[in-house]
Structures are given as structure tokens and as C-alpha cells.
Amino acid sequence: MSREHETAPATHEAVVARVDFGGCVLLADDGALLEATVRGRLMGPRKSLGNAVVVGDRVAFGIEHGRVVIGGVRPRRNAFSRRASGERPEEQVVAANLDQVVLVASLADPGFVPGLADRVLAQAEHAGVPARLVLNKLDLGKAAEAEAILADYARAGTPGHAVSAKSRVGLEPLRHALLGRRSLFVGHSGVGKSTLLNALVPALDLLVGQVNAKTGKGRHTTTAAWLVRPDPGFELIDTPGIRSFGPWGIGPRDLEQAYTEFRRFLGRCRFTDCRHDREPGCALRAAAEAGEVAPRRVASFLKLREELEQEEAHQETRARRGRR
Ligand SMILES: Nc1nc2c(ncn2[C@@H]2O[C@H](COP(=O)(O)OP(=O)(O)OP(=O)(O)O)[C@@H](O)[C@H]2O)c(=O)[nH]1
Ligand SMILES: [Mg+2]
Ligand SMILES: [Zn+2]
């Protein structure tokens, strides 16, 4: 074999389907999966992959000594991030170049709580990516409850679907909303993300876990974000279950803007610096009482803002200590 074939310039392109410790799996335009490594200069000073290459990135690669080596990453048109776990505030880019974020929750086992949904929706808004809510396990809950939840989110501008992956109810309209797009699936562990993707795309065969009967929590079956492409232009990204989601790049003062349905009431409160908490003449709380915004959204907003304020105060203290 001639040695010319061993080194080629980085002229091929592919999409990053998965990132592991040492490297990634690429999905080529013809559907081939390639194991790849990343050229050192793309990595940060800590020589870790960090956010340099993430699922959904379009990368250029070459073949060097028979190995696929990523030499460059195309600029991202958007990125969905979260705060990495740990004391230090660091960004974790979950995936890039998305057409939509699909927040999956379940009606029962585990039951719906707005905390995670509202954080993810705020982050999607911040990233400029449309979002959609899927309520799974309709077979275990009441249709009326699903309707009430979806109505609250419809008022927040988020379209929703009530489905049962298990009994295959409501899947067609959802599939329709996914076709021709790249969708990032996120949600708590055990809500049925992988089951749903398997039901939407036969032969996908993603790993499905059991919900722990004692804790009611999932077992984190999916261990890393994983992009699949059932058809050209139709891409789904499965992710591991999220235990707690810290928004990234949203400060406590910007948060009210990320709750899009609040916007038309902002600036109408009696006090210009109204915190929409206990102040008299608050237009936002009046809207909640009149049923124009969902009270559960206002409650989750107040809770999340408090958390972001605490985080900000904590980081200021850390910075002051660091300067001494
Ligand atoms: N009754 C019922 N059970 C479901 C439904 N969808 C999923 N399940 C069950 O819920 C459990 C968890 O499903 P998974 O698909 O692994 O959940 P996941 O969201 O991918 O979980 P992680 O990978 O840990 O994030 C499994 O036991 C599924 O069989 C549904 O529509 N109805
Ligand atoms: Mg899973
Ligand atoms: Zn107010």
C-alpha cells in the first residue's frame, strides 16, 4: 500500500454523534460511523476536550496513519448549555446546532414537576432555540391533568404533546413535529426519553432502564448524549437523565425575560423595581390571579430567581476571597 493514503488534509466533514473521554464518534453524511480523535491544539489549556467539540458540531477531519483526526470545528449557529456540576461556575455545552429542544416529562412515575421544565425552557429561550414539551406515560395518569399542564405551557408559547410511548398513543403528531429537524431530548431520568425515541424510530434500540420502585427515580440508563439520524435531515439526540439543571448565562435580573409569557406584563407593576413577590400592585401576580399566566410558572420563576441570586452572591464572595 502506498504511504500517500496515510496522511490526508482535513477535507472531509461529518457531524459529532457522541463524545467520550478520549475522542468522539462521527456520523458521516452517508450514515457511516467513525471513531475519531481530536487534534491537541483544539483542546483548552487543560488538555481536556471540554466544550471544544460537542454533539451536533460539524467538524472537518483527515485520516492520519489510518486514524480519523478532527482538525477543525465549524462555527456553531446555537448551543444549548447548562452550568456544569461543581463549586466553580463552568459552562457545559450539551449540544450545538439545534432546531429544537424537546423537554420530556412524565405524568406519573415520576410525576410532573415544573422545576426542570421551566429551567430548560428558559435556557432554550436564552439559546434562541424553539422548545416543545412532551408529557409521557399518559397511560399512567389522567388525560385531564395532562391537558391542564399542556394548556399552561401553550400560554407560555411552548407547544406540547401528551403521549404514551408504551401504548403508542399520540406519537404521530409528535413524529410530524420532529421530521426534517435536529431535536435535543432532555428530561429527568426515567421519564421515558429512550423508550420514546425507540417508539418513534423502530430499530433504534436505545438502552431503556427501570424506574426504581422504592425511590421512584430512574436509573440513568443513558450515559452520554447520542445523536442518531433515522433519515437524512431527521436527527434525534438522546441524553442522560438530568437530576438538577442549572441554567448557564442567565442572571437573576434577566430571568423574567426568559419566561416569555411574562413579557407583556413587565413594566406594568406599580413599582418600577417590583420583584413580583409581595409588592402591592404587581401586574404579573395580578395576571396569575386572572389566569392569564400560570401560577406554577410564577412560583417556579420566584424559586429559580432566588437560586440565581444566591449563586451570584456566592460567586461574589468567592471572588472577594480570591483577591485577598
Ligand atoms: N407505563 C409507561 N412506562 C413507560 C413509558 N415510557 C417509558 N416507560 C418506562 O419507564 C422506564 C424508564 O424509561 P427510559 O426510556 O429508560 O427513561 P429515560 O428517560 O431514557 O431514562 P434515562 O436514560 O435514565 O435518562 C422504563 O421502565 C420504561 O419501560 C410509558 O409511556 N408508559
Ligand atoms: Mg435514556
Ligand atoms: Zn411585579
Image (cartoon, rainbow, N blue to C red):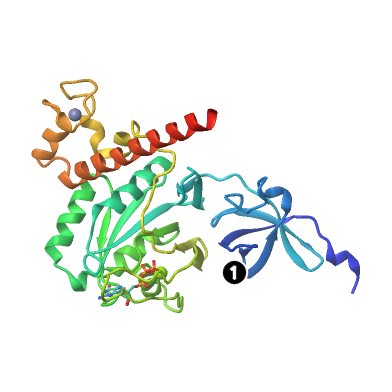
In x, y percent, where is residue 284?
Answer: 17, 33
In x, y percent, where is residue 58?
Answer: 60, 53
In x, y percent, where is residue 33?
Answer: 62, 70
Residue that extends furthest to the left in the rendered view of this protein: 290
Compared with 261, 102 (above or below) is below
Residue pictured at 21% horizontal, 69% vertical: 138
Quarter assignment of residue 293: top left
Left or right of residue 219: residue 256: left
Name the element at disc 1.
loop
In x, y percent, where is residue 308?
Answer: 35, 39
Residue position marked by numbered label 1 in the rendering: 31
Left or right of residue 249: residue 28: right
Compared with 207, 226 (above or below) is above
> Does the residue tagged 1 have its C-beta within 8 Å of any atom of ligand 2?
no
Left or right of residue 208: residue 133: left
In this view, the residue in front, 209 or 133, is 209
| Tag count | 1
